Every structure is written in structure tokens, then in C-alpha cells.
Image: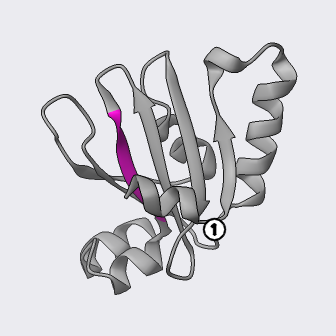
Amino acid sequence: MKQVIEEKQKVAVYDPCEAHDDWYADDFREEFNRAELKGSFYVVDARNVDWRGASGIAICNDWDRVLEVICIGKDYRIELSKGEGKNTLDGVTYHHDCPTGTYYTIMSGYKALSDGVICRETYKEYN
């Protein structure tokens, strides 16, 4: 998947270790917000989240919560690119617990329902 991300158009990249001033974080936040997907809520479908290779989903009511979910630990690097499907972003976060990367797809709630990531009851609960 790492090769796929490198070949896609990057939407935003953030590495706090390379940040020399507050403007760097602000620039990432602006790029991240510009890529916001359309929907009333968002689903983050993550793989290889920790050293054991755990996976799971997070349902986020707003775009700020998505950012909290993908920022893992204190030392991390985030790379986001446009996803293959409509209303999706693909990303990777490199961090201490998983230096090879935590891979995820961020999608709108409707896209998650259409792709079978969440069930109809969950969609109704959050929509």
C-alpha cells in the first residue's frame, strides 16, 4: 500500500519532527481541511494500528475528530492522498508502535455503508 500512496496525488503531509515553527502545523491543517469529504459523519477504516497488527474502524462526527484519530502518539508522520473511490482519502501514519505504517481509508458515512464497512443501523444512528 505504501507504493500506492507514493504514486497517488498527495493531499497533505505532516511530520512534527520536521516542524520548525507553528506555521508548518497550520499549513497541514489547512491542506487537511481542504480535502474534507462530503457527509454528515466520517469513518476511518484502519489497518496495522499497533505493534500487534490490530485493525478497526472509528466513527467520527466531525473533521477535527478524524484528525485526532490519525495522529498517533507524539512522534509521527502523516501522508494523505486522494482515495480510489469517490469521497475517500487514503493515508498512512508512521509512528513508534508501527514504524512500517498504520494504513487507513477515510470515507464519508454513506461511502462506508455502500462499501459494507458499517451496517445500516450504524449509519442511521450517526446520520
Of the pair 34 and 24, the residue shown nearer to us: 24
For label 1, the residue is 37
What residue type is disc 1 on?
Answer: Leu
Identify the residue at image location x=50%, y=32%. Answer: 71
Q: Residue furthest right?
A: 23
Task: Specify the quadrant of the image occupied by residue 78.
Answer: top right
Q: Position of residue 21 (x, y in %)?
A: 83, 14
Q: Residue 2: where, in percent of width, then height?
A: 42, 52
What is the secondary structure assignment of the residue under circle 1?
A: loop
Q: Residue 65 versus residue 106: which sits nearer the camera?
A: 106
The residue at 23%/32% (across/down) is: 50
Quick check: is 121 in the magenta stretch? Answer: no
Residue under the point 66% across and 57% down: 10
Q: Viewed as shown, does residue 63 lie left or right of 45?
A: right
Q: Does residue 36 lie above or below 72 as drawn?
A: below
- Looking at the rendering, the stretch of residues picked out in magenta corresponds to 100-106
Judge whether 78 appears above or below 25 on screen: below
Q: Quadrant of residue 34?
A: bottom right
Q: Main secondary structure of the magenta part?
A: strand
